[in-house]
Amino acid sequence: MRITVETSVEAPIDQVWQAYTTAADIVKWNAASDDWHTTRATVDLREGGAFSSRMEAKDGSMGFDFAGTYTKIVEQRRIEYAFGDRKAEVEFAPGPNGIVVRVVFDGETTHSVEQQRVGWQAILDNFARYVEANQKL
């Protein structure tokens, strides 16, 4: 099953793209809730390049690695990647209120579709807040 989440970011595409694809930015926004954080991230933004991020509960009770390989990059427009046997696509498109960032991903079977949608949406909303708060005018 495919799941879609999206947000609108009121910022120029170059700033949206940079925040989504730069490890130093990813560690600042990549969390679904305030009690989680990303402790490290790596990005090799090219087709065949690898990425990874370590997400952990701030109390140290649990954590996991999210890693994969980029399969297609269209600068400031599209990122496709594989993680395990799953795939995802991220689109960046002009919208009425800035840049629409849409993520479509293969769901997994451990959590409900709704839990997955809510979690990925929360991360994307956090991303939008981060970019808008850190715009370079």
Image (spheres, rainbow, N blue to C red):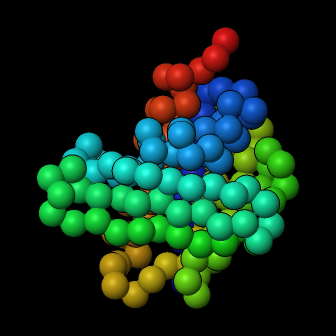
- Number of on-image labels: 0
Residue at 55% from the left image edge and 83% from the top image edge: 84
Q: Does residue 135 appear left or right of residue 29 in this picture?
A: right
> Relative to residue 92, is residue 25 depicted above or below?
above
Task: Tell me what residue is drawn at x 35 percent, y 69 percent.
Answer: 64
Toward which corner of the image does residue 136 lie, by quadrant?
top right
Q: Quadrant of residue 60?
A: bottom left
- Seen at 70% across and 41% down, the residue is 17
User: What is the quadrant of residue 94 in the picture?
Assistant: top right
Q: Is residue 16 left or right of residue 83?
A: right
**Seen from this angle, which residue lies furthest top?**
137
Q: Quadrant of the N terminus?
A: bottom right
Q: Residue 10, percent across and down? A: 62, 27
Question: Is residue 80 in view from this perspective?
Answer: no
**Residue 104: x %, y % from top left:** 62, 66
Between 35 and 105, the residue placed more toward the observer is 35
Q: Looking at the image, can residue 84 be seen? A: yes
64, above or below 37, in the image:
below
Residue at 55% x, 31% y is 131
Residue 137 point in image, percent of width and height: 67, 12
